[in-house]
Image: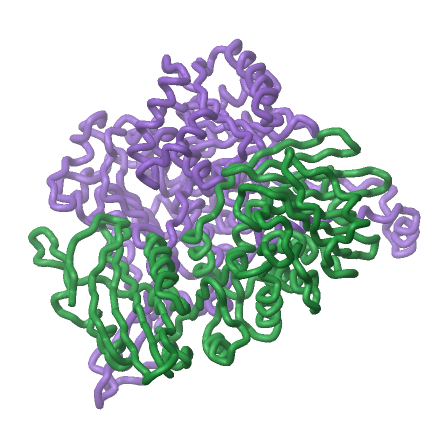
Chain colours: A green, B purple
């Protein structure tokens, strides 16, 4: 049924909602949205104007097994003011037992970009599939995507990269969006699987865990914008990343995808190869650790690895610190470079909305800069993911380096 | 016909780049001399390494810590455009944390009252409303006002000392962007004072110094050349950023991507396939209480000399070798140098002035009835011209340009009209399809439209024109930044690609000057000669009709 009201510019309004119980019915409802003669907006004196066409941006498929996750995802998509995908399919695979069934709610949301322009609309389909139907995701999705528009799959929470159904679905999409920092355990098994997927298919991958760190990367990159510091970039000798934990260092208890991405990004940009993958720091190595920053309690364990370029080894330390911050949050990135007897030390920290960079050259403070850089929300990150096109070589490089850093064997988290 | 007219060649404008220096006697000439010279030379310096960590990040680089000194801070331009752009850049974290805005004006504000004033302007003119209170609070902490009479040397001495103090207090490291949003008559004076107190000096350890200058840049070739000379006495050309805000518009920037980022269009972008080009910059507004200013300016100086000629040069230029500022501007200058028109010939340039009429269902007064306008005014509010670009690519392809006030609607558009097919194959078709057309809409509804012929469904073989339409709003669904945001950020980053160079400005004046001279030499024009709310005088239509063409209905 058509729902008509007249929102102001920039405000989204629900223009259509209806139910369907088969793919054919959903298709019928979708075509009705754009052909209903009375789907008009009241307009002063003019007798109404027809709602404008759907956007031509992309299809977004959200896959989950839990309705509450689908609701949260829908709320995030709704908050993408003016940046909606053309068609969103929220696919909830319900109870896999019993006969196949489908229940769908078809909606159209419209936004008036400006007072003098026609409305721009996007469709949203909440599709719950039970029984055998829920196990064949690709068969649900394929007939419902808008042809010729790219397809992005957003798989919040715990994606099942290796399952045949998932692979079947992923074979139909152009981009996969995940959040590595939400994965259970230390997240490393899924990180390996994601890297494998990216390396063996043409799918472009966006990981919120990596994208969230862009403010750190901007700050680290800015150090080497300075021509005095740039020559040190190829002479890194140590990378240390400190992250928050709540678990007293239990192996695999804290998701460490984000801290690992910091190292992986640097390694991929600087063409550093992994000489020794991450391994737990043993008692002997532990004693060499630096004191816990700012009075925080150091859990005492962590991971170390060795990277290498043609000039020497780069020691990597990824260490946990007890902190009230969410577990897995990066607290500090430290870099040490040595070039021709001269030393450059950089210390990057983030507090709330500000990232601070301090640099010492041969022990003398040479830079102290702050960047206003608020933490990015899921709405920002999803907007970035759906606007991206093609494979991002930086993201894929970091993902590949992360997998190499983690190594093929099981690595126990701290 | 235009082809039979003897064209008046413009006086050549001297090229800016210096002539090559005479070759010293010891320069090697033979292969042997050159080989020996090379052997005796030290190994060349290796290229400067790149910051590979920048790859894939949002900006090529974060702007350096800096102070933006805004002259004319109490003026309309500062309040409507410059300050809202700075606030927006701050809000989106595109300005450095170590940033200060020093607002300079002659009015008696203190910093607190000035902040209140710009807050109220932002509530009207900010691109994104409502204002973000947290962002505003942090931005406003970085704004201060200083009263300064531009003719008072002591004030500049004090300003120089104060900027040094700001460097100490806020870590702005001596980087300064001077933004001249004042009356054009004050540009030279301010620049001279900046030079006198040494605020132009760039030192390795004391930061960069740049000056942004608003249009109009001169009011004719002589004044523009003098202004360039005055500024050149203080700042090097690489420090000078002349703003034409049209170049910061998203669609104008996209024109470069469209032409040089696609392999489809460039092969047909020439006289062999293009019949003619139409560029329209139409405004539905009148002069909006700027009668005195507009009386001295007119449509030719206000729009043709800058916006329209910039659009012409972007459409007509050859691909630059790189996307570096000077490579781009070199190609634009080549186009300006190749433009010819015969200003004395009435059929090449048409001027107009609006009388009373109706625009958007409202009765509006004629130009001569506007406040601040001479009742006998001869200032043109409309100009249309047929420009020829005498080069290999465009010879024989007319570029029709027009701009006017009080047109039926606000619209800026570039239309590339392609030639008709050489042979009509579908002679039984009930209608002749129009030739292909590519329309690039710059404002409003930014986008690109391509018209082509298609078969009408049915048993016959009727052909009809259909359009493929791309609009930014439906394809990207992302707000475009305001042109001033783009340009100020570029200036802070030292990228001059979208700013006009001294020789560009002078060549543009060299095109416009003879047109204005011809009008000055002639008799009084029959003004008003078009009704407000129409597309200009009848002579404008005749300009194209003589060539068997007509203006596109927009």
Q: Nearer the viewer, residue B406 or A316?
A: A316
Rendering coords of residue A16 (x, y %): 20, 64
Q: Quadrant of residue A53?
A: bottom left
Q: Residue at x 23, y 37 (%)?
A: B286
Q: Nearer the viewer, residue B108 or A82?
A: A82
Q: Is residue B448 above or below residue B461?
A: above
Q: Is residue B71 left or right of residue B459?
A: right
Rendering coords of residue B420 (x, y %): 35, 73
Q: Nearer the viewer, residue B277 or A164?
A: A164
Q: Is residue B305 above or below residue A327?
A: above
Q: Is residue A102 left or right of residue B68?
A: left
Q: Quadrant of residue A47?
A: bottom left
Q: Nearer the viewer, residue B438 or A128?
A: A128
Q: Residue at x 30, y 63 (%)?
A: A122
Q: Is residue A175 above or below residue B201?
A: below
Work out which quarter of the rendered image holds the N terminus of chain B and state it. Answer: bottom left
Outermost residue on the top side: it is: B154
Rendering coords of residue B463 (x, y %): 26, 80
Q: Is residue B282 above or below residue B95?
A: below
Q: Is residue B542 visible?
A: no
């Amino acid at each position: 049924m058509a729902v008509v009201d007249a929102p102001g510019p920039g405000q989204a309004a629900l223009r259509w909602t209806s139910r369907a119980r088969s793919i054919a019915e959903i298709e019928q409802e979708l075509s009705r949205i754009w052909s209903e003669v009375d789907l008009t907006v009241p307009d002063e004196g003019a007798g109404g104007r027809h709602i404008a066409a759907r956007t031509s941006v992309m299809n977004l498929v959200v896959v989950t097994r839990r309705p509450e996750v689908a609701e949260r995802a829908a709320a995030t998509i709704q908050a993408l003011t003016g940046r909606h995908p053309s068609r969103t399919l929220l696919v909830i695979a319900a109870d896999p037992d019993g006969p196949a069934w489908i229940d769908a709610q078809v909606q159209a949301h419209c936004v008036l970009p400006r007072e003098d322009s026609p409305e721009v609309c996007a469709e949203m389909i909440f599709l719950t599939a039970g029984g055998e139907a829920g196990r064949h995701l690709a068969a649900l999705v394929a007939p419902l995507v808008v042809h010729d528009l790219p397809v992005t799959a957003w798989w919040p929470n715990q994606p099942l990269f290796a399952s045949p159904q998932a692979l079947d679905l992923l074979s139909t999409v152009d981009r996969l969006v995940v959040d590595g920092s939400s994965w259970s355990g230390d997240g490393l098994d899924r990180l390996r699987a994601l890297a494998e997927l990216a390396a063996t298919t043409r799918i472009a991958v966006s990981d919120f865990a990596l994208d969230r760190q862009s403010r750190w990367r901007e700050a680290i990159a800015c150090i080497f914008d300075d021509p005095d510091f740039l020559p040190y970039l190829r002479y890194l000798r140590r990378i240390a990343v400190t992250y928050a934990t709540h678990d007293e260092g239990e192996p695999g208890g804290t998701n460490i995808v984000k801290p690992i991405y910091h190292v992986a990004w640097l390694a991929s940009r600087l063409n550093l190869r992994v000489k020794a993958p991450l391994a737990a720091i043993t008692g002997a190595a532990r004693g060499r650790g630096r004191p816990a920053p700012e009075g925080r309690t150091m859990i005492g364990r962590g991971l170390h690895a060795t990277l290498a370029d043609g000039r020497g080894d780069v020691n990597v330390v990824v260490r946990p610190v007890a902190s009230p911050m969410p577990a897995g949050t990066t607290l500090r990135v430290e870099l040490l470079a040595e070039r021709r007897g001269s030393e450059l030390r950089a210390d990057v920290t983030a507090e709330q909305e500000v990232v601070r960079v301090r640099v010492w050259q041969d022990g003398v403070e040479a830079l102290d800069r702050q960047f206003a850089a608020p933490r990015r929300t899921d709405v920002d990150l999803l907007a970035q993911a759906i606007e991206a096109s093609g494979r991002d070589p930086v993201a894929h490089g970091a993902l590949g380096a992360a997998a190499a850093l983690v190594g093929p064997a099981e690595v126990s988290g701290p | 016909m235009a082809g039979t007219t003897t064209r008046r060649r413009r006086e050549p404008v001297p090229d800016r780049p210096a002539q090559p220096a005479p070759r010293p006697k010891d320069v090697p000439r033979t292969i042997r001399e050159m080989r020996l010279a090379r052997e005796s030379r030290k190994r060349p310096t290796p290229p400067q390494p790149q910051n590979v960590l920048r790859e894939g990040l949002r900006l090529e680089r974060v702007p350096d810590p800096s102070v933006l000194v805004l002259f004319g801070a109490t003026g309309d331009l500062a309040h409507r455009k410059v300050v809202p752009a700075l606030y927006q850049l701050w809000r989106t974290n595109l300005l450095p944390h170590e940033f200060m805005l020093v607002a300079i004006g002659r009015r008696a504000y203190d910093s607190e009252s000035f902040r209140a004033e710009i807050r109220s302007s932002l509530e009207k003119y900010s691109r994104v409303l409502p204002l973000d209170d947290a962002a505003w609070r942090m931005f406003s902490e970085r704004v201060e006002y200083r009263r300064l009479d531009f003719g008072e040397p002591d004030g500049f001495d004090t300003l120089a000392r104060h900027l040094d103090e700001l460097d100490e207090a806020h870590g702005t490291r001596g980087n300064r962007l001077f933004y001249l949003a004042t009356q054009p008559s004050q540009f030279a004076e301010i620049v001279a004072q900046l030079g006198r107190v040494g605020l132009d000096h760039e030192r390795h350890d004391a930061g960069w110094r740049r000056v942004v200058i608003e249009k109009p840049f001169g009011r004719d070739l002589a004044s523009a050349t003098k202004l360039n000379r005055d500024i050149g006495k203080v700042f090097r050309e690489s420090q000078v950023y002349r703003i034409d805000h049209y170049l910061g518009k998203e669609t104008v920037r996209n024109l470069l991507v469209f032409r040089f980022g696609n392999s489809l269009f460039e092969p047909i972008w020439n006289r062999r396939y293009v019949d003619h080009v139409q560029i329209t910059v139409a405004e539905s507004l009148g002069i909006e209480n700027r009668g005195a200013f507009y009386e001295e300016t007119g449509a030719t100086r206000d729009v043709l000399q800058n916006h329209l000629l910039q659009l012409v040069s972007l459409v007509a230029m050859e691909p630059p070798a790189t996307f570096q500022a000077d490579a781009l501007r070199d190609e634009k200058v080549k186009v300006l140098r190749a433009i010819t028109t015969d200003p004395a010939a009435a059929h090449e340039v048409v001027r107009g002035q609006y009388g009373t009429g109706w625009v958007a269902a409202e009765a509006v007064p004629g130009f001569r009835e506007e406040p601040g306008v001479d009742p006998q005014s001869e200032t043109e509010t409309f100009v249309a011209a047929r420009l020829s670009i005498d080069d290999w690519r465009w010879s024989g392809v007319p570029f029709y340009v027009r701009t006017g006030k009080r047109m039926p609607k606000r619209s800026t558009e570039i239309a590339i009209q392609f030639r008709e097919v050489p042979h009509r194959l579908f002679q039984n078709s009930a209608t002749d399809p129009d030739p292909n057309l590519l329309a690039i809409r710059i404002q409003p509804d930014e986008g690109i439209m391509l018209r082509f012929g298609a078969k009408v469904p049915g048993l016959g073989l009727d052909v009809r024109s259909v359009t493929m339409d791309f609009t930014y709003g439906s394809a990207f669904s992302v707000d475009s930044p305001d042109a001033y945001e783009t340009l100020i950020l570029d200036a802070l980053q030292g990228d001059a690609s979208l700013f006009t160079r001294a020789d560009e400005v002078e060549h543009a004046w060299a095109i416009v000057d003879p047109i204005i001279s011809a009008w000055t030499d002639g008799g009084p024009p029959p003004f008003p000669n078009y009704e407000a709310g129409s597309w200009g005088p009848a002579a404008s239509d005749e300009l194209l009709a003589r060539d068997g063409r007509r203006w596109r209905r927009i």
